[in-house]
Amino acid sequence: EKGGYEHFMLKEIYEQPRSIRDCMRGRIYPQQGKVQLGGLKEYADKLKNVDRIIIVACGTSWHAGLVGEYLIEEYARVPVEVEYASEFRYRNPIITEKDVVIAISQSGETADTMAAIELAKEKGATIFGICNVVGASIPRTTHAGVYTHAGPEIGVASTKAFTAQVSVLTLIAFYIAQQRGTIARNKLIEYLTELNEIPELVEKALKANDHIQTIAAKFKDSRNCLFLGRGSSFPVALEGALKLKEISYIHAEGYPAAEMKHGPIALIDEEMPVVVIATKHSSYEKVISNIQEVKARGGKIIAVVTEGDTEVRNMADYIMEIPQTAEPFVPLLATIPLQLLSYHIAVMRGCNVDQPRNLAKSVTVE
Ligand code: M6R
């Protein structure tokens, strides 16, 4: 049932070109510059006039929510707050009937997320779900929603469910932008055409697997690891760190690259690998300065770069290339090498990657 792969996690990493495709099927019309989300249709007017969106989730799903925040604010121009479900529900949050709450959950059974939904519902908010498991408790409780259609995810470490959540959030951002008229039709045609190519680009990114395995071999005995990114690559860095810590038990932290100088830089020495997302997009030059700060202190840089990049290649100790893409889709591609890196490190350390210690696939306790 692992389809010839050694672990479910690897199988699920490799399923992503298909799962992202499935997630977009029937929802995007690139030539017409149109996004259609059947599940949200009844709420099109509500979204057109919404003042604020609150995203609630836990773990990897919370990271997807942070990517969603960047996309919705950038393209739909609606303020977004992203909350850990467990914090949200215990602090008397300010919610009204005008609010739209989006709950993200792979399993659709996470107790904290469920409790946050109940609370927001009591206060009269409109609740949407982004779930993977059809008919689970969360999609049954929400007013409406969009399924991710990633297929069953068996590995405890979330991989294809994350990229499917990010895909759905990308669609939701464009959908709201379309309702509100905050994106030009031409731009939407351009972006949707590019989004339609993402499954092939993910396929291409997966081809770096053998190279990433050789990098993993160099860092398998590390005790700590930092992950840095800016903009929408910051949540990707957080997700990279979570993946590494949960399956390899190496202590890892994700930080916004510019925050490094406010504290974590004290940790940098020859023993400290720093994984940096340094693709050729808006904060490229800034990230290069952050790489120089790490190098000046003897840190080892593993950089995720845009294919063909030479500037970062000359500075970094190791590079992992991803294909060129438009800015909104970077999270979908930059996630791939980080998943593979964690996977190989964990396997080399003899860890049980599909069922890491102390973890369960769905957390049904609060
Ligand atoms: O099923 P959910 O998406 O609600 O689960 C939330 C978290 O427990 C989950 O994302 C967890 O962080 C992942 N297993 C990490 O890989």
Image: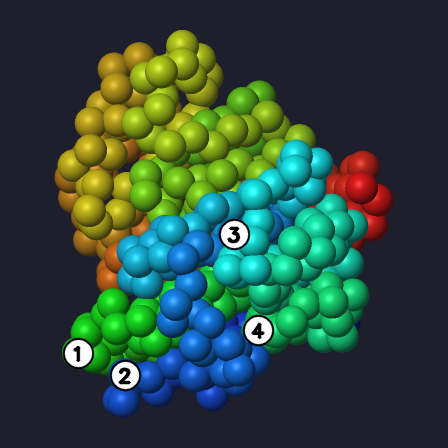
Q: Earlier in the sequence, mark 3 or mark 2?
A: 2
Indicate the secondary structure of the residue bearing disc 1: helix
Q: Position of residue 36 (x, y in %)?
A: 43, 83
Residue wearing tag 2: 33
Q: Amino acid at mark 3?
A: Ile
Indicate the secondary structure of the residue bearing disc 3: strand
Q: Amino acid at mark 4?
A: Val
Q: CA distance from mark 4 to mark 3?
A: 16 Å
**64 left or right of 304?**
right
Residue 3: tell me if it is visible: no
Nearest the viewer among 97 and 166 is 97
- Residue drawn at (57%, 73%) of the image: 146
Res 9 quadrant in image: bottom right
- Tell me how the rendering is colored: rainbow
Nearest the viewer among 294 and 328 is 328
Q: Earlier in the sequence, mark 4 or mark 2?
A: 2
- Residue drawn at (26%, 73%) of the image: 181
Q: Quadrant of the C terminus?
A: top right
**5 left or right of 100?**
right
Residue 227: tell me if it is visible: yes
Label 2 neighbour load within 10 Å: few <14, some 14-19, many 20+: some
Residue wearing tag 4: 146
Q: Amino acid at mark 2?
A: Gly
Q: Earlier in the sequence, mark 1 or mark 4?
A: 4
Q: CA distance from mark 1 to mark 3?
A: 29 Å
Res 248 quadrant in image: top right
Cβ atoms at labels 4 and 3 below 8 Å apart: no
Which numbered dot is residue 54?
3
